[in-house]
Image: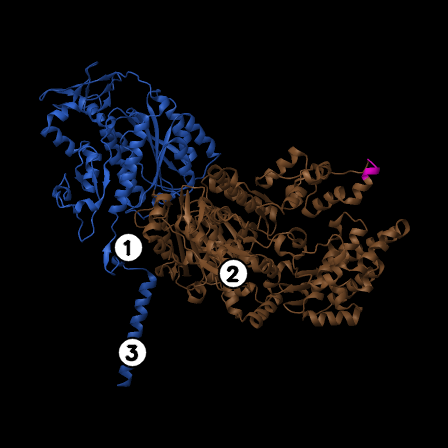
Amino acid sequence: MKNSERSRLNGEAEEEDDEEENLNGGLEAWERSYADDRSWEALQEDESGFLRPIDNSAIYHAQYRRRLRGRSLTVATARIQKGLIRYLYIVIDLSRAAAEMDFRPSRMVVVAKQVEAFVREFFDQNPLSQIGLVTVKDGVANCLTDLGGSPESHIKALMGKLGCSGDSSIQNALDLVHGLLNQIPSYGHREVLILYSALSTCDPGDIMETIQKCKESKIRCSVIGLSAEMFICKHLCQETGGTYSVALDESHSKELILEHAPPPPAIAEFAIASLIKMGFPQRAGEGSISICSCHKEVKIGVGYTCPRCKARVCELPTECRICGLQLVSSPHLARSYHHLFPIAPFDEATPSRLNDLHNISRSTCFGCQQSLLASGNKAGLCVACPKCKKHFCLECDIYIHESLHNCPGCESLRQSNPVVANEG
Amino acid sequence: MIFKLEDVTVYFPYDNIYPEQYSYMLELKRALDAKGHCLLEMPTGTGKTIALLSLITSYVLSKPENPVKLIYCTRTVHEMEKTLAELKLLHNYQTRHLGPAAKILAIGLSSRKNLCVNSRVLAAENRDSVDAACRKRTASWVRALAAENPNIETCEFFENYEKAASAAVLPPGVYTLQDLRAFGKQQGWCPYFLARHMVQFANVVVYSYQYLLDPKVAGIISKEMQKESVVVFDEAHNIDNVCIEALSVSVRRQTLEGATRNLSRINQEIERFKATDAGRLRAEYNRLVEGLALRGNLPNAWLSNPALPSDILKEAVPGNIRRAEHFLHVLRRLVQYLRGRLETENVEKEGPVSFVASITAHAGIDQKTLRFCYERLHSLMLTLEITDTDEFLHIQTICDFATLVGTYTRGFSIIIEPFDERMPHIPDPVLQLSCHDASLAVKPVFDRFQSVVITSGTLSPIDLYPRLLNFHPVVSRSFKMSLTRDCICPMVLTRGSDQLPVSTKFDMRSDPGVARNYGKLLVEMVSIVPDGIVCFFVSYSYMDEIIATWNDSGILKEIMQHKLVFIETQDVVETTLALDNYRKACDCGRGAVFFSVARGKVAEGIDFDRHYGRLVIMFGVPFQYTLSKILLARLEYLRDTFQIKEGDFLTFDALRQAAQCVGRVIRSKADYGMMIFADKRYSRHDKRSKLPGWILSHLRDAHLNLSTDMALHIAREFLRKMAQPYDKAGSIGRKTLLSQADLEKMTNDGSINEMLY
């Protein structure tokens, strides 16, 4: 009996050994997915010791408000002059650091996806602008696509060229972009957006000189960092009037990139009015058959006809392949309109006024009719329009400013009281 | 902003004030009211200096009936300039609001090297030779000779200053060293002597520690300070070491050889004087007979000097050294005796009493004679009209030694080591008179002045300083930093990536696993931390060893892929160059790592703020070299006299050094930085609890026992969070910047007290 016991004990010990070996040898696949995911870090303890998901919405909103304020400030000083015709180079860092897995599946893939979304959004908001792509790999900057107005061609070129290695060099990228942007006409706004994964830059020369050169050529450089704040990037953005931000996570990085879609305020020296020739093509008839100039294929029914040379193009906005005319549709121009007349940022409302019983309407959001009193007895944050004094919740606040571009409160006021509207 | 602090109207030159500055002022004011000493710890970057200056000057303005003089002691010239610049800003603000009533005179005082405007004097390379060059031109006998012989060079600035005589005064204002030089140049007056003269009349004097603590200098500079002065020691975390150094002397073989040379030179001079001007020597003799107190240049209100206890003033110089030749003989015998002692094979340790007894027996010099050596030499050199004092440093050292040995019977020990512990094959005998009692040097300061303020960013544990310095503070408090965001992230790393403990403990030091784990930590960190990283090691030898290991195993190469590597060496010039290039690499985005040593020059005086230091790693606990004889003797003394346990003192000392090192990264509230304490011993409570409160309050329990991978993850998150924009003023409920209106409101409804405690 003793023997059997001993053997059992031995067996147990061996089992334990096995387990340990497993642990040392590497995690199981399912364990690894948890270990990599780090889902426990999305939780935090509240005052009473309960676990709750981390509530970042307040932080996000505070940051959004700050951006809004900053923007309205610059708008006020620049007299709402906006650079509507932009020439933007997107520099994508494909150095070693872009292979890091802290964004799933990797920084490079996430960035590529977000660039895709950005390119579409960009052309949506800036129908008159052009984009080019530059990649940095092994310390060398390559021009992936030239300046162009077609989102599809950029996206296709980018997706085909993913792969990263070596160091990264801001100076090389800036030098290349500087050379390319120097050729564009003076009415265009020169911009660079750098999506930077690495935490250092291996430069062949003095980067400060390059920064000064960009500053002289009025190139506005913005950087989005993916891991941490770097001094040189901050310095570059400060010098050239761009913005510098660092992404917290994937969704935040997307937000940061999309923030660059609306046109920035114009630089004062460039704020001279100039006329630009544009064509408004007619949509082709339902059944008409023609060869389109962009794909050299026979198409039935879709496409637009250039008013000058009558060539057929598939989509707008673009530049005519034959005569080089800017082709846009009137909605594109109309969409640029709201950039010039933004709605005033809402004021933060004091939560105490919400308890006022005489004013029940104040305790719900005017936009979505949700109660403004946050769950629990804590009063939630809310904002009020400075003109119509209607209260809105934070989500509606963002929606109104970012997408709607009209205040529902002011609009309804205008309908119910036409005299005021006329005066306005 | 202007606000009421109890019965004092405080003029503060900025629109907003940090809450901790307010409470700092409050505590300081209470200490001034009580006319007592105080001990205040407040982290750097919270505007300690301006709070202090603005309170004390406002205090004087509010209570004109007792004019308080402010003596502000700094460690370096750079800090002195910074302090004066802030004072200037404050003074402008006060005069704008109060008009001429707020006029004060504030000056900085430094050595001739920093104040001289004579280009020929300044050409000398070090401090001592500048001093000597100055004396060569300004000594009274030189000038007397020059009056007859125009070929002898004098200093025109000093001549002009002397000519102006009592008219040579500074108009009220705040003068930095730069301003003093400019003023001197413009008026043609020597700024050094002008500043020294004006020290008596100035409302605020900013100078170095030595001017108060070093008995030799203090006697000359600080003797005429009135009792109603407030003395401030800024960055005073090492004040005990400064005190001890001021009273410690070490004698090497070179010193003795130099002293012998000096003695023969003095002998020649004496012979020369005997031949030409015997009267002078006789006059000196007569003067000495009458006693020191009656001598013209010795003031009656002597700062009760520890090196010269009061009885020395009443006594006359003993008869056997009154004659110059006799004194010379005594010194010769002393040097001979010391040389004999240096020839020993073994380490010897002795108390002053038995040492003096042995001198008496072997060299025939008694205690009293020894005690007068310093004064006697001083007098002799004046009589002999020796100007190149820098040549005579060796004999001065010997006389310092003799005076100290003859004066004190307790708190000192004499240690003779035939070779350096670490290099036993190279004979390098050294005789050290080491002071163990920091309170000796600082005692006259505490006794003499009404209020002494000791302040620094790291004074923890705050109850130990009063014991070390032997005084009773009326206020001792440690302030925390109020932050809008958690911008410091201390972490204790106890395990490497393989989960084995890391430490620089003696038995683990040579373990290759530890070196590898430390290396892995750094390799991982350089890939996720932007710009600058600073690493501190416990000693030069350990740093050399570990870097060699890293080099062999290729870790150094991996680090270099991400960042450039710079190393501090014992050579100052080399280190300065390395620091310069380190900064350049951080500026241009290449990124760099700086390897440095705790207790080194870099750890004490260089700031790694902003992007120059996003992360600091303290590899190991920087204990002192515990086998050092001097340290052992000091520990024994502390245990016997102050009942401080050896372990407690060692830990305290190590932890304040560590805190000092990691404190380098954060210099303002807008800054952010991480600190990694990489040693398993930091997780123990007795070690950790000795860190300053402002670090401890950010050290979360979850960060106490980390391994490399966990630390990496925390660092990544922290850096991302810190890169986000934020509101400087802080949100509601957590106010970190108070405007005047805020302050008034809070004082009225009493919530200010709540905030303070």
Q: Does the magenta stretch include residue B28?
A: no
Up-down: is B230 above or below B326? above
Q: Mark 3: few, some, or many residues within 10 Å (few <14, many ≥20)?
A: few
In the image: residue B234, left or right of residue B219: left
**Which residue is outermost to the front?**
B65
Give x and y (percent) for residue B204. Answer: 56, 46
For the record, the magenta segment spans B146-150
Question: How far is mark 2 from mark 1, CA to CA?
Answer: 34 Å
Protein chain holding label 1: A
Q: What element carries label 2?
A: loop
**Which residue is outermost to the bottom?**
A1
Q: Nearer the viewer, residue A47 or B336?
A: A47
Q: Which amino acid does label 3 sit on?
A: Leu
Q: What element carries label 1?
A: helix
Mark 3 and mark 2 residues within 8 Å of each other at the beta carbon: no
**Which residue is outermost to the right?**
B275
Residue A9: which numbered mark, if any? 3
Q: Nearer the viewer, residue B215 or B427?
A: B215
Give x and y (percent) for residue B263. Answer: 81, 56
Question: How far is mark 3 from mark 2, CA to CA?
Answer: 47 Å
Give x and y (percent) for residue B74. Answer: 56, 50
**Which chain is blue in the rendering?**
A
Q: Nearer the viewer, residue B419 or A55?
A: A55
Q: Is mark 3 on a helix, strand or loop?
A: helix
**Which chain is brown in the rendering?**
B
* Residue denoted by label 1: A41
Up-down: is B643 above or below B733? below
* Residue denoted by label 2: B622
Q: Which amino acid does label 2 sit on?
A: Pro
Q: What residue type is labelled 1?
A: Glu
